[in-house]
Image: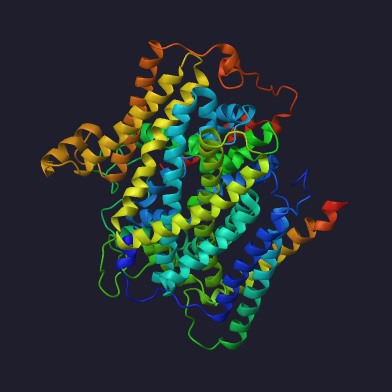
């Protein structure tokens, strides 16, 4: 992004955000799936386990962004 | 809206788990870390106030559209979608896309080639100090007031949705925004806006996905709405606008096309410095032209996460939401709560934290955007020309950092003022609209007609603004001795029908104030002496060399993508007619 300053691209920070949030949401979704399977689900459509696949999507996107925009590659 | 919320629900809408709190805490840590990291790059005036003019078209485009994607807008327009149906999407489509394309193709070359730091800065070059000073002072005051309103709005939403203390929200958000904007200037504001853009999308996109699964798709949703609200049409954009009384918004298609599409949106998207500043940070003229056009495609998609949740609320919520009013009974919710209600409906721990973080990020980005724009206009358009002309660049950077903090203190004061005098919020939001439509007339005439004179620019802008204020007061019944009958008469005169409701009145008010500005500008121009051509080079269409694009491939031409955006817009109108 930066020619004069060699700033870490904002996309890398987006990747970090996605990766951290994806891990947290995926983990909490998996825990809820395992431990609360017999309980009546609170959110509507909880049986779809949205946190698991949404968290996985965020992890995947975060990983792609972090790898593609990792600062060392900018410096090369 | 926020005042009504503040006085409303006595219980919280959602309860956060430790996972949700961790997600929110990580966001605060990340934006502060980014602010400290960017501080080392914001050394010169161009770095601090214009992010070094080195943003790519994508970053500038996302920041451009994100500066308008604050939480106040999200909550308000989702509530409007519940109240008025898909008509609310006009503010995202015809009320934004043509203006964004117009900015990119027609107006951006003049802003960029003139190397101005701001919109008042362009007025300074084109019309001189009087018009520029009027525009700068009004913009600075309104921006800082809006920042305070945004701050208070966030505190109220956090109180209603989560039960958080008002003081806690105001202090934490203002200190965080103050630190990262004072450190990194526009770099920080833009980075935060890009993060916010992704947060809002990924925090809110699950609502329409799960909502459409629950209702069985668009047709299932429409069937449920018709079942819940028989005899009312919430899902057509144009079919019900041939009269003021045939749609829930009380609006006529002429108000949408001429008031919203041709004036109000053009004024906002092309002359409001808060959004234009993001595009001025682009690294070259092609990026500056492409940025708003890239933004227009994302803007077209925003109804998916704002309007559709409102419509889904009509279809699936077990209760009927009610108009915003103070002291709602226990268990009743207002229109503006539809987005948090839908979030709570579909999102459990983790996802709920993501959605709430998106709202917090939206509010903070809104504050940061206002404060960074204020710092620029104060420093370059008020302090430098009127108070201290020839100081070194480092002095102006220092002034920018100081007035970021001072601006935030004033914003906090405004927030507490709004807390005690709730109606101030409505007036501040109305005030902001007074200047936008006439300013568009002034800037556009200045760019397209070299004959327009300095005096004409000032008097046209002043007349347009005063006419806007006068129409507002008359239609709101605020003049002494004005009774209900005369108020209705004024509405019938300005908004073409006594049945025209609030949003329709706003659109006609914008239209007539712009017309007033243009007429006065033309008349004064005809009796005053124009500037010599040499002083207008790079500022006016007929005297500016704009780089041609014949040697650029069609896929890299802003004009091609601008036409593509307009084509998609036309298709959307037909699909949802």
Give above or below for B51 relative to B181. Answer: above
The spot of residue B369 in percent (x, y) is 54, 50
Residue most toward the right?
Answer: A76
Task: Confirm whether residue B308 shows in the render.
Answer: no
Q: How many labels does the image show?
A: 0
The spot of residue B416 in percent (x, y) is 38, 62
- Please tell me which residue is depicted at 79% across the width and 49% down the height of the picture: A6
The spot of residue B35 in percent (x, y) is 65, 59
Give above or below for B315 relative to B46. Answer: below
Task: Confirm whether residue A8 shows in the render.
Answer: yes
- Residue B251 is drawn in which quadrant? top left
Looking at the picture, tell me which residue is in the foreground, B93 or B36: B36
Give above or below for B217 relative to B8. Answer: above
The spot of residue B536 in percent (x, y) is 57, 17
Give above or below for B406 relative to B534. Answer: below
- Relative to B479, is B393 on the left or the right? right
Colouring chosen for the image of the structure: rainbow
- Relative to A37, is B510 on the left or the right? left
- Relative to B116, is B478 on the left or the right? left
- Please tell me which residue is depicted at 32% across the width and 57% down the height of the picture: B226
Looking at the picture, tell me which residue is in the foreground, B480 or B322: B480
- Please tell me which residue is depicted at 53% across the width and 89% down the height of the picture: A38
């Amino acid at each position: 992004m930066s020619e004069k300053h060699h700033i870490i691209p904002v996309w890398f920070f987006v990747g970090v955000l996605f990766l951290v949030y994806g891990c947290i949401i995926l983990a909490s979704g998996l825990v809820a799936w395992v431990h609360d399977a017999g309980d009546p689900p609170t959110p509507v459509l909880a049986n779809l386990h949205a946190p698991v696949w949404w968290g996985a999507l965020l992890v995947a996107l975060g990983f792609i962004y972090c790898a593609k925009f990792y600062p060392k590659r900018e410096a090369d | 809206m926020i005042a009504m919320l503040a006085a409303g629900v006595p219980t919280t809408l959602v309860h956060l788990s430790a996972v949700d709190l961790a997600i929110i805490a990580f966001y605060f840590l990340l934006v502060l870390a980014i602010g400290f990291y960017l501080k080392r790059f914001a050394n010169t005036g161009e770095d601090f106030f214009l992010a070094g003019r080195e943003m790519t078209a994508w970053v500038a485009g996302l920041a451009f559209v994100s500066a308008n994607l604050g939480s106040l807008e999200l909550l308000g327009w989702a509530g409007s979608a519940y109240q008025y149906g898909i008509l609310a999407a006009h503010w995202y489509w015809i009320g934004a896309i043509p203006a964004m394309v117009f900015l990119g193709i027609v107006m951006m070359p003049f802003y960029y080639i003139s190397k101005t730091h701001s919109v008042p800065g362009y007025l300074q070059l084109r019309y001189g100090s009087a018009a520029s000073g009027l525009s700068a002072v009004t913009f600075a005051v309104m921006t800082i007031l809006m920042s305070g309103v945004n701050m208070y709005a966030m505190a109220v939403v956090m109180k209603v949705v989560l039960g958080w203390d008002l003081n806690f929200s105001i202090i934490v958000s203002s200190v965080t925004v103050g630190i990262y904007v004072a450190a990194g200037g526009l770099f920080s504001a833009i980075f935060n806006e890009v993060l916010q853009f992704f947060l809002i999308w990924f925090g809110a996109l699950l609502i329409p996905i799960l909502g459409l699964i629950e209702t069985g798709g668009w047709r299932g949703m429409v069937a449920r709405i018709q079942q819940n609200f028989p005899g009312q049409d919430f899902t057509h954009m144009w079919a019900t606008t041939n009269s003021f009384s045939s749609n829930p918004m009380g609006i006529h298609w002429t108000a949408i096309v001429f008031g919203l599409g041709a004036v109000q949106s053009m004024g906002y998207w092309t002359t409001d410095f808060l959004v234009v500043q993001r595009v001025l940070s682009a690294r070259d003229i092609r990026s500056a032209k492409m940025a708003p056009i890239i933004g227009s495609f994302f803007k077209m998609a925003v109804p998916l996460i704002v309007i559709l949740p409102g419509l889904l609320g009509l279809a699936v919520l077990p209760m009927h939401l009610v108009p915003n009013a103070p002291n709602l009974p226990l268990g009743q919710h207002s229109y503006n709560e539809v987005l948090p209600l839908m979030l709570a409906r579909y999102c459990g721990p983790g996802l709920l934290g993501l959605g709430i973080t998106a709202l917090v990020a939206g509010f903070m980005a809104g504050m940061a955007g206002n404060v960074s724009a204020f710092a620029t206009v104060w420093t370059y358009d008020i302090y430098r020309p009127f108070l201290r002309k020839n100081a070194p660049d480092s002095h102006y950077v220092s002034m920018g950092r100081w007035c970021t903090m001072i601006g935030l203190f004033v914003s906090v004061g405004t927030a507490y003022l709004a807390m005690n005098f709730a109606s101030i919020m409505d007036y501040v939001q109305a005030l902001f609209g007074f200047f936008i439509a006439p300013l568009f007339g002034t800037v556009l005439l200045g760019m397209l007609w070299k004959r327009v004179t300095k005096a004409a620019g000032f008097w046209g802008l002043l007349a347009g603004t005063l006419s806007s204020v006068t129409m507002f007061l008359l239609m709101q019944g605020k003049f002494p001795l004005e009774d209900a009958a005369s108020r209705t008469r004024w509405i019938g005169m300005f908004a073409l029908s006594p049945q025209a409701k609030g949003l329709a009145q706003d659109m006609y008010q914008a239209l007539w104030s712009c017309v007033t500005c243009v007429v006065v500008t033309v008349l004064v121009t005809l009796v005053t002496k124009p500037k010599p051509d040499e002083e207008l080079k790079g500022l006016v269409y007929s005297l500016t060399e704009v780089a041609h694009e014949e040697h650029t491939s069609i896929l890299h031409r802003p004009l091609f993508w601008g036409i593509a955006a307009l084509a998609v817009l036309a298709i959307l109108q037909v699909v949802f007619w």
